[in-house]
Image (spheres, helix red, strand yellow):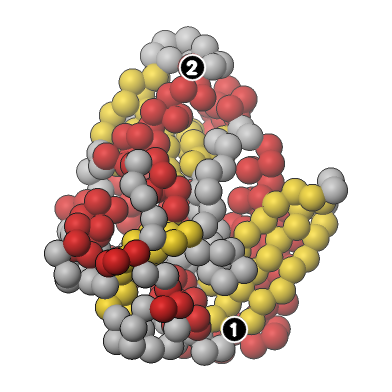
């Protein structure tokens, strides 16, 4: 793999910035790449709810297809967008060092989530964010929103929304300011949030895996194992956050009802991220999570 490799990703401003991070990580290993922008169905259809056109995975499938066809050699994704099962013949070879995992509120007059007035329109395309926002402030009117981060913020400025909730890492990568960074204990992130992952064909995994940041890889592997154990896609109201502490993988998981009024959460630790994630997912189901997930089905 001494030739210049083709790095594929979405063509949005944020995705191009993320590709620059990947390019720098690979360049440190003497792997040269050129960026190939890929248009996904989620980019073409900016009006339909993500839940109706395939969930967060809609941003990954077109890039994955380009990888399988040989159009690109490496794909860069936001790890939170990657479905529990990836395309056969490919591998998630390397996670880059994780950025801020928190969610962020951008609001008119810089109001915080707790003091937004009754009936305030809060935009998010995520059931996880919606459920946790409603858990904290049941008087909000949470509405679906599409579009890139800049577009969402502009809609707040135009008065279409009183606030939007987005990933803090996305704001920071774009150089935008948050009205409030939401504490993790109040709004737990999505599995993989804040992390970038490099996907490649299996025959190239050994080379690309040299870019892997082990603490991020262990944490996100546990989070994704929980996701698989729940049998759930990213559009359901679930959250997870893993980390390495004292030589162990520690994983917290959370499930909520769609209206945010019911919440189940727990934490487990162990040496094997797959086993820890599976245990958290299965235990959440045993403690009433199965009923919550059924509520969340479209």
Q: Can residue 93 be seen in this snapshot?
A: no
Q: Residue at x 33, y 56 (%)?
A: 58
Give residue 178's position: percent from left, percent from top: 39, 55
Classify 10 Å Cα crowding around label 2: few (below 14), some (14-19), many (20 and above): few
Return the residue at label 2.
27
In this view of the protein, which residue sits in the foreground, 194 or 168? 168
Q: Which mark is residue 263?
A: 1
Residue 187 seen from this side: yes
Up the image or down, 64 lies above or below 8; here it is below
Question: In front of the other: label 2 or label 1?
Answer: 1
What is the spatial separation of the Cα atoms under label 2 and label 1, in whole angstroms?
Answer: 44 Å
Q: Position of residue 237 (x, y in %)?
A: 49, 75
Q: Residues within 10 Å of mark 1 (few under 14, many from 20)?
A: some
Q: Position of residue 96 (x, y in %)?
A: 55, 36
User: Residue at image x 57%, y 71%?
Assistant: 186
Please tell me whether mark 1 sits on a helix, a strand or a loop: strand
- The tag earlier along the polypeptide, 2 or 1, is 2
């Amino acid at each position: 793999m001494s030739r210049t490799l083709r790095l594929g990703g979405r063509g949005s401003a944020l995705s191009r910035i993320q590709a620059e991070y990947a390019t720098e990580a690979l360049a440190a290993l003497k792997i040269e790449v050129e960026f190939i922008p890929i248009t996904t169905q989620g980019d073409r259809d900016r009006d339909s709810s993500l839940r109706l056109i395939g969930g967060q995975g809609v941003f990954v499938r077109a890039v994955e297809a380009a990888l399988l066809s040989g159009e690109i050699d490496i794909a860069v994704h936001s790890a939170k967008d990657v479905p529990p099962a990836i395309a056969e013949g490919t591998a998630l070879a390397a996670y880059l060092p994780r950025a801020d995992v928190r969610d962020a509120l951008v609001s008119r007059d810089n109001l915080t989530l707790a003091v937004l007035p009754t009936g305030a329109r809060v935009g998010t395309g995520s059931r996880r964010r919606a459920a946790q926002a409603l858990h904290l402030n049941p008087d909000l009117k949470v509405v679906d929103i599409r579009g890139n981060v800049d577009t969402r913020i502009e809609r707040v400025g135009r008065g279409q929304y009183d606030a939007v909730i987005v990933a803090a890492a996305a704001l920071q990568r774009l150089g935008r300011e948050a009205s409030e960074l939401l504490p993790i204990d109040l709004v737990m992130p999505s599995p993989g949030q804040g992390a970038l992952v490099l996907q490649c064909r299996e025959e190239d995994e050994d080379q690309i895996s040299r870019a892997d940041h082990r603490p991020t890889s262990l944490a996100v592997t546990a989070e994704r194992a929980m996701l698989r154990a729940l049998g759930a896609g990213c559009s359901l109201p679930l959250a997870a956050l893993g980390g390495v502490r004292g030589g162990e993988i520690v994983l917290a998981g959370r499930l909520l009802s769609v209206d945010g009024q019911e919440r189940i959460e727990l934490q487990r630790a162990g040496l094997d991220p797959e086993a820890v994630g599976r245990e958290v997912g299965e235990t959440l189901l045993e403690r009433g999570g199965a009923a919550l997930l059924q509520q969340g089905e479209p």
